[in-house]
Image (cartoon, rainbow, N blue to C red):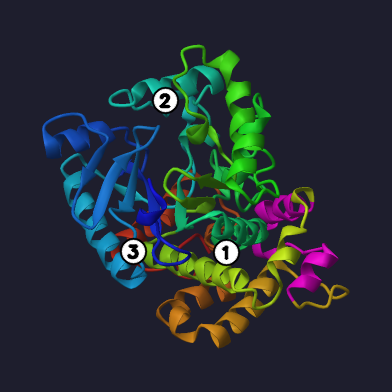
């Protein structure tokens, strides 16, 4: 793609949402994505364009991805489009005695016995992944996320955007964690999906790195130190050359120079599009503040070491919004007293105040949803509150049925509504 066809920073965005297909009654995963698509097109296909929204397949047959068909800046309208698409898909799924379920991990799925791979178009890619990494695990077949695609025009814009994204990644799970329960029990992580994410390709460490991307700020350097290393390391495992290093890059944010975008990949899917887009909007506005150097220069942003950012990230995936941030330089850069206790939740509350002053009209449509997350906790925390430490199957089923209803009705989850109290 030539630069003349590319967007500049924050001109438009691409959002992707992943959901599970589950049985209407049992809520067990239902691996029927290929048959659902075939019922619409008459053939097995991995993508169906439905106007402003496109549905596509994922590695696991019980997962569907919903994405905007083209970049857009109107997230309010996108929320309407997404919800209409979810209603349409649920109507179709009802003929299969199925429906969509949100959250980043199914709470009782047994991946060893319930994982089924997509085997149709591009099936050879998924087969190669399975052969190398064994994809019958929670970190491969039981995970759903939200992706945000942000454009850049040239190296200068890439440098600013990549630097800003590196700073925000460690604290994203404090907004979006939604995977606390796996295998029918609390995992001791609010974001267990990301714990799997950072470890599920450890036989080839260069694919994921430290999740937080390296301090690299040009196309040439990125290709030299990331893509070339991945290409070298995958070669012994992929003698037929099926896997492209660009697809294999699994950092928390990946650079796509072929389309002039950076894709953020570590946000857990929420209970409804309103919540997903509220978080996406907050992230986008936060990144704009950083790229416009309103609180620190780009040079200062680039100085933060990947290992230090990773240390924050490791705490946040476990404790979410309750994580105490111990990195004094990080706190000082964002205007906090480095000698006072600051949690990740405190960080976001202060950032919201600052952002509301700078970009009031950008935050207004999502203010209610953002405040709910910051006041009542991440979806993971609200799920745990609803279970009341009761992880019996019947209680989990009741809580996750309420979450599934939230998706159907585009309503945020209130921990006071359900659960065994």
Label 1 close to label 3 by CB (< 8 Å): no
Q: Is residue 238 above or below residue 407?
A: above
Q: Residues within 10 Å of mark 3 (few under 14, many from 20)?
A: some
- Which x, y percent locates residue 208? 62, 37
Q: Residues within 10 Å of mark 2 (few under 14, many from 20)?
A: many
- Which x, y percent locates residue 399? 44, 56
Q: Is residue 339 above or below residue 46?
A: below
Residue occupied by mark 1:
175
Label 2 close to label 1 by CB (< 8 Å): no
Sooner in the amino-acid sequence: mark 2 or mark 1: 2
All told, the count of numbered labels is 3
Please, what secondary structure does the residue beneath circle 2 have?
helix
Q: Is residue 176 above or below residue 128?
A: below
Please, what secondary structure does the residue beneath circle 3 have?
loop
Can residue 24 be seen here?
no
- Which x, y percent locates residue 387? 54, 57
Q: Viewed as shown, does residue 373 lie left or right of 224? A: left
Residue occupied by mark 3:
72
Residue occupied by mark 2:
126
Q: Residues within 10 Å of mark 1 (few under 14, many from 20)?
A: many
Q: Which mark is residue 287?
A: none
The alpha-carbon separation of the residues under discs 2 and 1 comes to 31 Å
Q: Main secondary structure of the magenta part?
A: helix
Stretch of the chain drawn in magenta: 308-334
The quadrant the N terminus occupies is top left
Label 3 close to label 2 by CB (< 8 Å): no
Sooner in the amino-acid sequence: mark 3 or mark 2: 3
Q: Nearer the viewer, mark 1 or mark 3?
A: 3
| Nearer-the-camera pick, 213 or 405 | 213
Q: Residue furthest right?
A: 339
Give me the residue at 57% from left, 64% from top: 175
Q: Viewed as shown, does residue 72 lie left or right of 299? A: left
């Amino acid at each position: 793609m030539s630069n003349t066809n590319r967007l500049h920073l924050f001109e438009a965005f691409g959002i992707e949402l992943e959901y599970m297909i589950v049985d209407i009654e049992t809520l067990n995963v239902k691996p029927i994505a290929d048959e659902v698509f075939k019922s619409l097109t008459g053939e097995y296909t991995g993508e169906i364009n439905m106007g402003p929204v496109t549905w596509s397949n994922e590695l696991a047959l019980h997962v569907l991805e919903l994405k905007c068909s083209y970049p857009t800046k109107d997230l309010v309208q996108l929320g309407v489009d997404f919800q209409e698409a979810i209603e349409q898909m649920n109507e179709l799924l009802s003929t299969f005695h199925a429906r969509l379920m949100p959250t980043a991990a199914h709470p009782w799925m047994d991946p060893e016995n319930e994982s089924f791979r997509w085997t149709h178009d591009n099936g050879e890619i998924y087969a190669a992944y399975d052969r190398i990494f064994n994809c019958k695990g929670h970190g491969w077949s039981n995970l759903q996320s939200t992706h945000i695609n942000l454009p850049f025009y040239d190296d200068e814009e890439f440098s600013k955007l990549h630097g800003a994204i590196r700073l925000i990644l460690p604290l994203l799970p404090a907004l979006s964690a939604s995977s606390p329960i796996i295998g029918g029990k609390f995992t001791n992580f609010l974001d267990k999906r990301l714990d799997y994410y950072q470890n599920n390709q450890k036989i080839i460490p260069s694919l994921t790195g430290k999740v937080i991307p390296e301090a690299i700020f040009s196309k040439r350097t990125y290709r030299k130190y990331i893509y070339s290393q991945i290409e070298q390391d995958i070669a012994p495992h992929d003698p037929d050359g099926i896997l492209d290093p660009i697809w294999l890059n699994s950092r928390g944010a990946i650079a796509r120079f072929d389309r002039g975008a950076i894709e953020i990949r570590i946000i857990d899917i929420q209970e409804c599009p309103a919540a997903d887009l509220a978080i996406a909007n907050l992230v986008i506005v936060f990144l704009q503040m950083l790229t416009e150097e309103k609180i620190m220069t780009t040079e200062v942003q680039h100085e933060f070491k990947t290992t230090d950012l990773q240390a924050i990230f490791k705490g946040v995936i476990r404790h979410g919004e309750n994580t105490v941030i111990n990195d004094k330089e990080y706190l000082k850069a964002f205007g906090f007293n480095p000698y006072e206790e600051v949690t990740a939740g405190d960080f976001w509350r202060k950032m919201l105040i600052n952002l509301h002053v700078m970009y009031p009209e950008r935050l207004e449509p999502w203010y209610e949803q953002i405040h709910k997350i910051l006041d009542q906790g991440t979806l993971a925390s609200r799920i745990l509150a609803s279970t009341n430490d009761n992880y019996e199957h019947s209680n989990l089923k009741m809580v996750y049925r309420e979450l599934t209803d939230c998706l159907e009705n585009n309503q945020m989850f209130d921990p006071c509504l359900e659960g065994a109290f």
